[in-house]
Image (cartoon, rainbow, N blue to C red):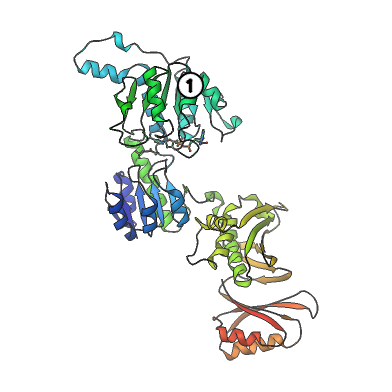
Amino acid sequence: MRVLVSDDLAQEGIDILKKEFDVDVKTKLSEEELMEIIPNYDALVVRSATKVTKNIIEKSNLKVIGRAGVGVDNIDVDAATHKGILVVNAPEGNTIAASEHTIALLMSVARNIPAAVMSLKNKKWDRKSFVGIEVRGKTLGIVGLGRIGKDVAAKAIGLGMNILAYDPYIINNTLENTHIKVTDFETVLKNSDFITFHVPLTKATYHMIDKDQISIMKDKVILINCARGGIINEEALYEALVSGKVGACALDVFEHEPPLESPLIDLPNVVATPHLGASTAEAQINVAIEVANDIIRALKGELVKNAVNMITVRPEEYHEIKPFIELAEKMGSLYTQLKNGRISEVEMIYSGKVTKFDVKPITVAAIKGILTNMLEFPPNLVNAYLLAKERGIKISEKKVSEDQDAPGTITLQVTTDKGKSSISGTVFEKDEIRITAIDDYKIDLIPRGYALMSFHKDRPGIVGQVGSLLGNNDINIAYMQLGRKSFRGEALMVLGIDEEVPEHVLNEIRKIEDVSDALFIKF
Ligand SMILES: NC(=O)C1=CN([C@@H]2O[C@H](COP(=O)(O)OP(=O)(O)OC[C@H]3O[C@@H](n4cnc5c(N)ncnc54)[C@H](O)[C@@H]3O)[C@@H](O)[C@H]2O)C=CC1
Ligand SMILES: O=C(O)CCC(=O)C(=O)O
C-alpha cells in the first residue's frame, strides 16, 4: 500500500509508516499537482498547509486521510465521508504546545515584549513606552473549554487569573477544576479583561466575534486567537484595534494564511506569530506518531483511535461488540436479499447484554449491510449512515429489556411501501452468531457461506423434492432448518449449502407445487 505525506511531518512518524508501506513525501504541491498523483495512493497525511479539497478527494482512491494535528478544517470532511474515506486526526499530541503558546502570547501582549525587544534591537533604551499590565487578579474569558481551553485555564489559574468560560457542549459539574466558572457567551464577553479562543472552526464558530460581539466587550479588552483564523471577523477586529475598543490582540492564526497582505500585522497593538501553536519539537513528534499509528490501523482494517467521521468503538469494548457488528451487517444484507420495496424506516431494537454498549456502531453496520445490495459502490462504516439519510431512510434505535444476564439480541425492523418486516439475531457464548427469526418464522441459522430459502405450504414431499433438485445439480446440503407459522400453513425452509445455486435451479424449485418463492442467499 502507498502513503503520500504532503506536508512537513516529523521523521518519527514517517519512519513508523515506512516500516509498513511505501511512503512518498512530496510537499508544497498545488491542487492540480496533488489531483494528478493522488489516485496512486491509499492514504494521505497532511498538517495544515495542504488543502484537501473535494476535487482531490473525488479523484482519489484513498482509504484514509490523516491530519497530524487537531483542526480538520483544511480537509473537506463531508466529501471524504461521502466517498467512504476515513478521516483521522491527532488531537492529543499538541495540546500542551498550543496552550503554552497561548500563555506566551498573553504575557507578550500584557508586557509588550515583542515591541520592547524590537526597540532594543534597534539600539533604543526606551522604558517608558512599554509599561505593561499585570494579569494576576484579571479575568480571562475562555471560549471553548476542550483540551486546550482547559489546559489554558489551569495555567492561567496558576498565574492568579479568574476564569470565565463558555462552551455549550460541556456540563459544568463534570469539570474537575472548580476555579473555572462556566457561563453564557455574553457574560464572558462583557466581563473579561482578556478573551482567548479555543474552538474549532465550524459554521457555528465562523465570525462568532464580529462588530456586535466586540461592542459589548470591556473597553481595552485584550483578545488572543491561537485556534483558527475566521473565528474573529478580521475587518471588525481591525476597526476595533484602531479605535482602541480592543486594547491589543495576539494572533497565531488568520483567515487566509500566510496573511502577508493583512493590515492587522502592521498594527502596533497586534502581536502575531505564523501559526506556531503546535510548533514544538515535542508536539510535532507526538502528532506524527499519533497519526502514523492510526493510518496503519486504518489500512490494516483495525480499530482506529481518533476517527473524525466514523462512529468508533471504545477499545475496551471492541472484542465484545465485534460479533454484534458482524451479526447486524449480515442481518442487513439478508434483509435486502429477501425483500424488496422502497425503504422508509429502519429501526434497530436491542435487548439483553448488548444494551450495555453504545449501540450506534451496530446500527451503522446493519445499515451498511442493507445498502450493500442496493448501491453500485458498496458503502462502508464511514458513509453508510449518510447514504441512508440521503435516501430519506429514517433510522432509529431502542433498547428494550436491559437484563445483562440474557443473551444479546438484535431485531432489525424495516418499513417499506410494501409493509413492515423484521429479522432477529443473537450472539451466543463464544461469539457464535445466529439469525433466530425472519418475520414470524423462528429459525436457527448460522449466517455464513451460502443458503437457500424457500417459502412454501407445509405439506409432505416438498423438502424431498427440493433436496433431489439440488442433488441432481451437484449442490451439497450442509444443514436444514424448517420454520412454519402453523400446521400445514405457510412454511420457510432454510438450507445451508456448500455451492452457489444457479438461477435455472432456483426457477425449477419455484415451479414445485405449493412453493411460493425460492431465494439464494450469500452471507
Ligand atoms: N494554533 C495552532 O497551531 C493550533 C490550533 N488548534 C486549534 O484549537 C482548536 C481547539 O483544540 P482542542 O482544544 O484540542 O479541541 P477540543 O475538541 O478538545 O475542544 C474544542 C472545544 O470547543 C467547544 N466548542 C465547539 N463549538 C463551540 C462553540 N460554538 N462555542 C463554544 N465552544 C465550542 C467544544 O465543545 C470543545 O470543548 C482546534 O480545533 C484547532 O483549530 C489546535 C492545535 C494547535
Ligand atoms: O500542524 C500545525 O503546525 C498546526 C496545528 C494545528 O493548527 C492543529 O493541530 O489544529
The three-letter code of the residue at mark 1 reads Ser
Query: If the image is split into quadrants, where does the C terminus sit?
Result: bottom right
Q: Is 289 in front, or is 2?
A: 2
* Quarter of the rendered image showing ligand 2: top left
Measured as percent of width and height from the top left, residue 281 is found at 31, 36
Residue sitting farthest toward the bottom: 472
In this view, the residue in front, 246 or 440, is 246
Q: Say which element carries label 1.
A: helix
Label 1: how many Cα within 10 Å (few below 14, some 14–19, many 20+): some
Question: Which image quarter holds the N terminus?
Answer: bottom left
Q: Name above or below for residue 71 compared with residue 177.
A: below
Q: Quadrant of residue 90?
A: top left
Above or below 83: residue 226: above
Q: Position of residue 71 (x, y in %)?
A: 42, 40
Question: In this figure, which residue is indicated by the disc labeled 1?
Answer: 215
Image position, residue 499 (x, y; %): 54, 81
| Disc 1 residue: CB within 8 Å of ligand 1 | no
Quarter-wise, where is residue 353 in the image? bottom right
Specify whether residue 179 is in view.
Answer: no
- Residue 413, quarter of picture: bottom right
> What x and y, as percent, mark residue 263?
31, 27
Q: Give the left or right position of residue 481, taking residue 36 as reference.
A: right
Q: Is residue 272 above or below residue 516?
A: above
Task: Tell how many labels.
Answer: 1
